[in-house]
Image: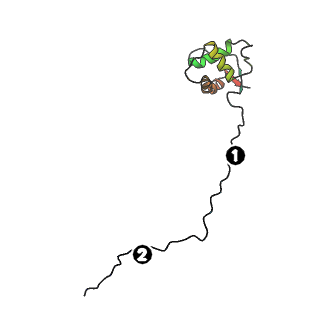
Amino acid sequence: MRTATTTSKTKKMPPKVVADKPLSKASVTKVPKPVAKTRGAARKSYKFIGTMPEQSGFTPQMYALLQTISEAKKTELDPNKFTAQDLVALAVKRGFLSTCQDPLRIFRFYKDRLVSEGFLSEV
């Protein structure tokens, strides 16, 4: 015996669910601006220890920075207290350091090595 099944030609949609109350907007907390705790590497003061290395094992740019400090007059650059900006400006002015990029970037790259090997110390 065959049973007849009937199917509806229209689909019934489920009833629409309505929220009881509208969703609240997310609260936004204000993030404070970052505060610089130090003056930055360009404004830190450095001291030249007084030893000049042999050229072997040093890049020309690193040697140029040390050569600038050792040959500078006290009126141009005080070896007991100078900033990275002063050193780099004098090296470019004298022609020891010539580069296509920012000269201060050269100092930032070699700063850690110069300090760790004992040629410079932070004041």
Asked whether the viewer can see residue 57, the reply is no
Q: Residues within 10 Å of mark 2 (few under 14, many from 20)?
A: few
Q: Name the residue located 64 percent from the left edge and 14 percent from the top edge.
A: 93
Quarter-wise, where is residue 69 in the image? top right
Disc 1 element:
loop
Name the residue nearer the viewer: 101 or 20: 20
Q: Is residue 112 visible?
A: yes
Residue 51 point in image, percent of width and height: 67, 16
Three-letter amino acid code of the residue under disc 1? Pro
**Viewport quadrant of the C terminus:** top right
Whichever of callouts 2 and 1 sits on the residue coming sooner in the sequence is 2
SS type, badge 2:
loop
Q: CA distance from mark 2 to mark 1?
A: 53 Å
Mark sitting on residue 12: 2
* Residue 16 placement (x, y as % from top left): 50, 72
Instruction: Indicate the position of residue 47 as horizontal and vertical percent values.
Output: 72, 21
Horizontally, residue 4 falls left or right of residue 34, namely left
Residue 61, above or below 3? above
Q: Amino acid at mark 2?
A: Lys
Q: Which quadrant does the N terminus fall into?
A: bottom left
Q: Residues within 10 Å of mark 1 (few under 14, many from 20)?
A: few
Q: Residue at x 71, y 32 (%)?
A: 39
The residue located at (35%, 76%) in the rendering is 9
**47 left or right of 99 in image:** right
For label 1, the residue is 32
